[in-house]
């Protein structure tokens, strides 16, 4: 809400329940994921209802929190100084996300570049030396980068072009073009998620990385488990970002249809576009290094 008696450029927000509710919802969702995955791997009966409750609460928090931010903007609380702070905040958020992916790439590069050192100098166990003698590890059937991964690369690159088209259309006050570009971006993002889900199902079905076979880490399967862990963590975390970015863009699409954006005031869309370009760039690194250079046919 606007604070009409305040004579400065900063916005002091009203007390809000959404940060606390969002944190509690995330905890419920995390416990639900643990309970569900225990059943997935045969440890105990899976209980997915708790995860669904947490997810529903998270989505509810997002809807009401974003609603309040939009109301603040329309009330005139987003002054130039506040808008600058929002931009800095989004930049720092994306920078923190970059650090997440740096850690995933780190372990992958560590094993891809220095597996020979581990095999020759760091173990006296012959099975371990054999397991780490090559990367990808012996027994791992890697994915063909020029099949589904290439399809997803083309989908994301095209989506990046579409969201740029939407941004330029919005700057030119072409509302129809902005809506069309956003709609195309959302469709391409959803297709990416579907293709990656299909890829994961094929990997799980064929046991390409032996990731679902829990054996002694001192044999070749243990090395394959590390490969699978690094692969799924990097690509899966990126897939989660694509899902979040798609939701972000859907909200922007609905706001564009409602006429909330103007050529001079559309930071919500700009933030979504920055995030989407970040997702695109990370995928290019994943495709180049995880799929092609260090993950080609073995």
Image (spheres, helix red, strand yellow):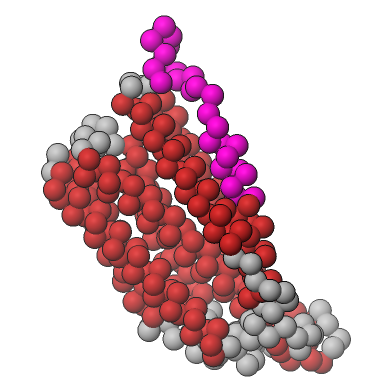
Does any portion of residue 247 appear in the rendered image? yes
Residue 138 shown left or right of residue 277 in the figure: right
What is the residue that sits farthest to the right in this orientation?
124
> Which residue does the image show at 53% across and 36% down from the upper left?
18
- Please give the range of residues in magenta: 1-27
Most common SS among magenta residues: loop
Which of 1/8 is in front? 1
Q: Splitting the image into 4 quarters, where does residue 184 fall?
A: bottom left
> Which residue does the image show at 61% across and 72% down from the upper left?
230
Q: Splitting the image into 4 quarters, where does residue 223 fall?
A: bottom right
Residue 23 shown left or right of residue 221 in the figure: left
Q: Which of the image's four quarters has the C terminus? A: bottom right
Which of 94/66 is in front? 66
Indicate the position of residue 257 as horizontal and vertical percent values: 21, 44
> Which residue does the image show at 63% across and 52% down from the upper left?
28
Check the image and report above or below for 117 versus 28. below
> Which residue does the image show at 39% across and 72% down from the upper left?
194
Q: Is residue 5 magenta?
A: yes
Q: Is residue 14 magenta?
A: yes
Indicate the position of residue 121 as horizontal and vertical percent values: 80, 81
The number of numbered discs placed on residues in the rendered structure image is: 0
Q: Which of the image's four quarters has the N terminus? A: top left
Q: Splitting the image into 4 quarters, where does residue 19 fall?
A: top right
Residue 110 shown left or right of residue 13 in the figure: right
Which of 46/181 is in front? 46
């Amino acid at each position: 809400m606007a604070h009409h008696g305040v004579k400065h450029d900063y916005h002091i927000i009203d007390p809000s329940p959404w940060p606390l509710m969002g944190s509690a919802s995330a905890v419920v969702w995390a416990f639900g994921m643990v309970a569900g995955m225990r059943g997935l791997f045969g440890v105990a009966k899976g209980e997915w209802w708790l995860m669904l409750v947490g997810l529903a609460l998270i989505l509810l928090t997002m809807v009401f929190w974003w609603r309040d931010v939009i109301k603040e903007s329309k009330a005139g609380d987003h002054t130039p100084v506040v808008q600058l702070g929002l931009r800095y905040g989004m930049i720092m958020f994306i920078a923190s996300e970059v650090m997440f992916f740096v850690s995933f790439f780190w372990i992958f590069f560590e094993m891809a570049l220095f597996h020979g050192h581990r095999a020759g100098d760091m173990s006296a166990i012959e099975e371990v030396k054999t397991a780490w003698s090559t990367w990808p590890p012996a027994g791992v059937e890697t994915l063909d980068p020029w099949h589904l991964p290439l399809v997803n690369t083309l989908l994301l690159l095209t989506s990046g072009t579409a969201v740029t088209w939407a941004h330029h259309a919005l700057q030119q006050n072409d509302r129809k073009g902005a809506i069309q570009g956003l709609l195309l971006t959302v469709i391409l993002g959803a297709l990416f998620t579907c293709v990656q889900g299909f890829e994961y199902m094929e990997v799980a079905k064929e046991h390409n990385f032996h990731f679902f076979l829990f054996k002694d880490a001192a044999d070749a399967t243990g090395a394959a488990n590390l490969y699978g862990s690094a692969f799924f963590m990097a690509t899966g975390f990126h897939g989660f970002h694509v899902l979040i970015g798609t939701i972000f863009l859907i909200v922007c699409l609905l706001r564009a249809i409602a006429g909330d954006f103007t050529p001079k005031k559309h930071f919500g869309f700009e933030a979504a576009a920055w995030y989407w370009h970040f997702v695109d760039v990370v995928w290019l690194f994943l495709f180049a290094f995880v799929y092609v250079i260090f993950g080609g046919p073995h």
